[in-house]
Amino acid sequence: QTRVKNICCVGAGYVRGPTSAVIAFQNPDIRVTVMDLDEARMKKWNSKHLPVAEPGLIDFVRVSRENSTPNPNLFFSTNVSECVAVADVVLVSVNTPTKLSGIGAGAATNLVALESAMISVAKAAKSGAIIVEKSTVPCGTARTIREILTLYRPGVPFEILSNPEFLAEGTATDYGSSQSSSGLAAATALEKVYAKWVEPSRIVTVNLWSSELSKLVANAMLAQRISSINAVSAICDQTGADIDEISKAVGLDQRLGGKFLKAGLGFGGSCFKKDILSLVYLSRSLHLPEVADYWMSVLAINDFQRDRFVNKVVSKLHNALMGKKIAILGYIFKQDTNDSRESPAIEVIKTLLAERPAEIAIFDPGCNVAEVRQNIGRHVAPSEAKPPKPLGPVEAAVLILTPWDQFRYPALAKQHSVFRKYSSDGGVEDLKVFQKPELSETDIVALGEFKPSSTMSLTEMTSSDPLNRLHEQACPNGCVY
Ligand code: NAD
């Protein structure tokens, strides 16, 4: 039976980087090499400023990269053939975004990066290597991978496993193998790697297709819970019922549980929308339009909720943003990361910019300014007409779009001095920030007043903040746009 001594991880992104570090940390006797074509990203993985921010990640990486006993066992490289050639197990986690053009555009999964990675793996892998599909892929991709391997290395035996990443849930792992004896042996070999830290009862071996589909289903169902509670929050808004009280009451039913029941701005991130679209595309291909429509409605509610929020902000500012100032606290899609992909904040800010406010200042401790500029910069409205001169104090709003702890009340209240920075002459004393401890879309709007001369600077927020280990790694000054 295969004993795993050498693992190569292809794709050093948000998923593979952290999970490779955990595998190396938990298995000091296994040499783990993470491989990616992106040289800039790999330089960061080899430095103390990692490209991905997750609480505790730097500690895992440091131990395995520098101090593991008997030898360091975590390496980062851009040389694909060298790394793959010696590996007993190759874990492939490259990006699989939604297709933007061609057949299935806007719904199907773009498998270009996966195919290209698999070709490199096929060319270099040693006979008998276990190739593991870790990317989230459409059902049936394992068959495509088999075809690529056969095309490039005819007659060479490889085992293919599907082991989608259930990383957000922390420890659950599920994988699919062919039901042949060599397929099951490959699954057992990988199982031993995980068994160092995952309870055996949480390791589930299923058939290949179930494994691929289960990842899409898990993400779609999590997203569906968010859309469900957000849909209810719209009813609450018009009836006087309190969405937080409803979440609490409903969550006490053990069949439902309390998680993923917080109303808010809606989900973001690179996975939920993409994976639902993939499920929709699959349903349509299987001639199941009712199923496709069902999952599409989860996305529709997500957009509806975000638009509802922006409309409310604009209406609280009397439907006239020209000349007014807006501070956005939180830009990334989830606190404790540096990932802004598909963040709802992006659409919120674009819509507000179209209303031509005097200024929008954006602060997030986790992200970097270049990223914000890239997404938002080109959406700055042309100043074809000069905004009217304010006659009195300038109205302003603070919108909290990511529930970082430091933005929560009372953390925010403690940092009240920060808000004085808005105005050198103390005009911000009037600024009121209303926010309950839990972020809920009905509480996000806070109104206050700025004196016309005030300038916005939120940089000071970072310096006094105790939880900044994270952004010291990712972005020393936080992100101020
Ligand atoms: P990512 O875009 O952060 O990283 C992908 C990496 O793959 C990039 O660094 C890219 O340079 C690299 N890459 C692309 N082609 C390559 C090649 N031929 N050889 C070597 N490297 C190559 O993506 P991610 O967020 O880490 O997601 C990876 C996969 O995991 C996706 O399928 C995603 O759906 C899935 N997933 C993501 C999450 C998440 O929380 N981000 C959770 C579970 C599953």
Image: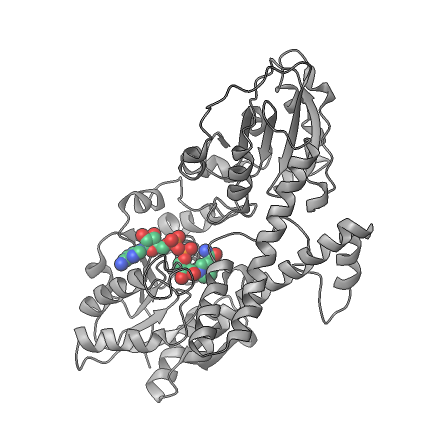
Q: Which residue is rendered at x = 68% and y = 54% of the image?
A: 262
Q: Is residue 102 left or right of residue 79?
A: right
Measuring from the top left, give residue 361's x and y in whole percent.
54, 28
Going by the picture, which residue comes out furthest to the bottom?
180
Quadrant into which the N terminus falls? bottom left
Front-most of 188 and 50? 50
Measuring from the top left, give residue 308's x and y in whole percent.
64, 47
Q: Which residue is rendered at x = 48% and y = 49% of the image?
A: 342
95 in relation to 131, above or below:
above
Going by the picture, which residue comes out furthest to the front?
385
Looking at the rendering, the quadrant in which ligand 1 lies is: bottom left
Q: Is residue 370 left or right of residue 333?
A: left
Q: Is residue 91 left or right of residue 14?
A: left
249 in relation to 459, above or below:
below
| Quadrant assignment, res 401 | top right
Q: Which residue is rendered at x = 50% and y = 21% of the image?
A: 385
Q: Which residue is rendered at x = 58% and y = 18% of the image?
A: 388
Front-most of 236 and 181? 236
Measuring from the top left, give residue 273's x and y in whole percent.
50, 59
Query: How many marks overall?
Result: 0
Front-most of 478 and 218? 218
402 in relation to 270, above or below:
above
Going by the picture, which residue comes out furthest to the top?
425
Measuring from the top left, give residue 250's x and y in whole percent.
77, 63
Q: Is residue 414 left or right of residue 108?
A: right
| Quadrant assignment, res 21 | bottom left
Instruction: Please say whether residue 214 is visible from this viewpoint.
Output: yes
Instruction: Please say whether residue 68 is visible from this viewpoint.
Output: no
